[in-house]
Image (cartoon, helix red, strand yellow):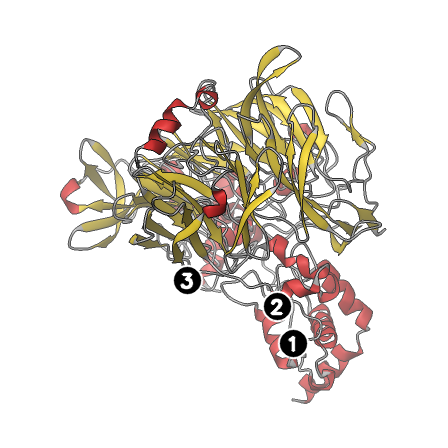
Amino acid sequence: MRGLALLACWALAIPAQDGAEVFRATCAQGYCHGAAGTQGRAPRLIGRNYDPAFVVKVVSEGVPNTGMPGFRNSLDTARLNAVIAYVVRISGGDLSKLPAAAGGSAPSVPADVKRGRELFQDAVRGFQRCNTCHVMEGMGTPVGPNAAGSHDVESIRNGKPAAVRRAIVKPGDSFAALTVETKQDWVKLYDLSALPPVLRTLRKADLSFADGADWRHSKVVANYTDAELASIAAYLRWAASH
Amino acid sequence: MKAAVALTVMTAPAVLAQSGATAEDWPHYGGTYHAWRYSALDQVKAANVARLSPVWAFQTGDYEGGLQATPIVAGGVMYVSTSRNNIYALDAATGREIWKYSYNLPKGFTIFYGSWNRGVAVGRGKVFMGTLDNSVVAVDQKTGRELWRVNVEDSQQCGCNITAAPLLVKDKVVVGVTGGDSAHRGYITAFNADTGRLAWRFWTIPGPGEPGHDSWSGDSWKSGGGSSWMTGSYDPELDLIYWSVGNPAADFYGGSRKGDNLYTDSVVALHADSGKLAWHHQQIPHDVWDFDTAYENILFDATVKGQTRKLLLNVNKGGVTFVVDRTNGRFVAGHTIVKHINWIAGLDENGKLVGRNEPPAGVKTFICPAIGGGRSWNQAAYSPVTKWYYTTAIEWCQDVLSAPEDPVEGRVYFGGSFEMRHPKGERAYSHLDAIDPVSGRKIWTYRSKYPLLASVLATAGNVVFSGDPEGWFFALDAGTGRKLWQFQTGSGHRGSAITYAVNGRQYVATPSGFGSAVFGLFAQLWPEAEHFRGGSMIWAFALPEGSR
């Protein structure tokens, strides 16, 4: 408790000017809260008389389903508290009741894990990247299973979920498919014939399945080298234990 | 009597000369592929528009961000999307709901640039929509049942999504992407309309080894913006798709992306089947103002120096209109649509920018127009009868503070900030003008207190329709700009009015419901705007039965 109180005092000791600078570079950007909180697409902050605890929560965690992100992981503790104090001040709120917030970036990871993470979600590759089909750290499309685990280059190249089947759609369209949901009249499945997979809803009457799907994990990861897959494997092993 | 309107449509000679006019249906986002937002219907005309009366209204209930859509009408059914990705099919004559589709957005995600959607594409028995989480979805046109969906890129990673209407060309559905103010590399993507499978991808920023890649210094191409956030046009004869590519990122700071930054702030022409580049025309090399060549491309033919030319007109956010030859992208003409403009001194005879006024890093610089645009994305209209285009424009300015910034993938990447300012010597205001597209001559102007943010609709009845932020939907004489009629719809206008006919009766329909990022800037200049009411409603008007 005493540590928290000390932290609060320390946060308040940061010059207001620093909070203004963090605000300018973060909250006032683009179409958001406007210069000095005058209003943009995001709400006006001046004169709102915010409860300091509310500001701490919103600035730290964001507001789900809106454009307001949380800054807990992108601002260090000093800057996070400085900008919170600034927002409370311009809103006319009571600075003496300001609790401290804890910021800081995500924990540091080994270099090969960092490299593996970058490769897993490498935007330069377009659709030819792992998170086109696997979600890691909240990003990606959940087509395939959770990829975290005890992997190596070989197990990534030759991964093959047993559930991939050949779907046959009248008249004569046949493709590798992963069934997601089956109801009385229709089936929802991922069409894996090309990247990105397409989530299709097909009438049961138009659909049949057969074995022998023409799909290999080695094909969809073909543009990664062995060295790159080794980094990805390191990332997947790290993720399994974090 | 009821068949009269259809007969009139089919025989209007001025309209048959070019195929850009709509008739009974409103089949595409821009009216037709030519994006004229012009209808050949003339039952409602300047002489009788004062008798226009509401015949139905429809509340979507989904009002966050307002109602920004362009409704599509096909065969007497209206298809309209709402800000959080619902689609309604309505009886276009009565407003009765036929079906509703709700896209299930992931829970708890951050919505980049806000909740809004600008419309659907309809065809091949399907309705297509882009989503707030950057997916494309196809639903059955008759039932609203989902047929396929595909994610274009994780929206939390890329800081991007889809808010524009897709463009359906032959068997492909083409979508753009937002993200021009994020650290992101833009693209235009086409999917097979029947299966959802990828057809092609055009990267708006060339990769290593591709022509134009050397217009980016260092690794800046990876996070250089180049969004494609509005809907393209299509010329079936040339088989070319025309799409606008937005500003480079970081928006206000260019020191880390030296070079022309292709194909940002360009119109690109793509072969419809392959997505391969046919030509490009860059309006603003190395943009440091966020002046986005992002808006609609109006395809029209006109006589220039005695020769009939196939042309393309594009108004950009910097308040400059460019007219190019749409067969090859060569500059034909250009003019400004705003009075208060100081980011350039003008254009030379080749359409190159002259007298660039770049904000230096760390020094507050007064720039006109403001980031909201000399015009916003709401579209202009083109009339083949008057041969003028009708566009809104906004006179407002800003203080820009440019600052270096490091890109973080998917995060906002503006490279500075801005404060809204009134122009020197007068208060900010807006206007809707009739302009000759080639000479740039302004024929008439209609003045508005607040920025006009709704699209313009022109008709063969010699009427121009639009709406204002205070909720007034109004009709102007297309020849003189004189106001002929207005109706208070209860909330401001941020979408696009359309006109169509069912069983021989012409309807004029408009979304009503204010919102959007640009509206968010209003309160910095007009504090009362904070109290402007939101909403999300379709109003349909027609002449009273028996009075036509």
Foreground mark, 3 or 1, reads 3
Foreground mark, 3 or 2, reads 3
**CB contact under 8 Å: marks 2 and 1:** yes
Quadrant of the rendered structure where residue B39 is? top left
Q: CA distance from mark 2 to mark 1?
A: 8 Å
Seen at 22% across and 33% down, the residue is A173
Q: Chain of mark 2?
A: A
Can residue B204 be seen from the camera position used here? no
The picture places residue B75, in percent across and down from the top left corner, at 30, 38
Kind of residue at badge 1: Ala
The picture places residue B369, in percent across and down from the top left corner, at 74, 44
Considering every residue shown, the one lying at the far front of the view is: B547
Q: Quadrant of the N terminus of chain B?
A: top left
Q: Nearer the viewer, residue B61 or A95?
A: B61
Q: Nearer the viewer, residue B309 or B170?
A: B309
Q: Is residue B385 above or below residue B149?
A: above
Kind of residue at badge 2: Arg
The picture places residue B302, in percent across and down from the top left corner, at 58, 19
Check chain identity for marks 2 and 1: say if they share one: yes
Q: Chain of mark 1?
A: A
Q: Give the residue number, with chain letter if any, for mark 3.
A: B61
Q: In the image, which disc is placed on residue A101? A: 1
Q: CA distance from mark 3 to mark 1?
A: 37 Å
Q: Considering the numbered disc 3 on the image, is that residue within a helix, a strand or a loop?
A: loop
Considering every residue shown, the one lying at the far top of the view is: B306
Quadrant of the rendered structure where residue B334 is? top right
The picture places residue B374, in percent across and down from the top left corner, at 69, 42
Q: Give the residue number, with chain letter if any, for mark 2.
A: A72
Kind of residue at badge 3: Gly
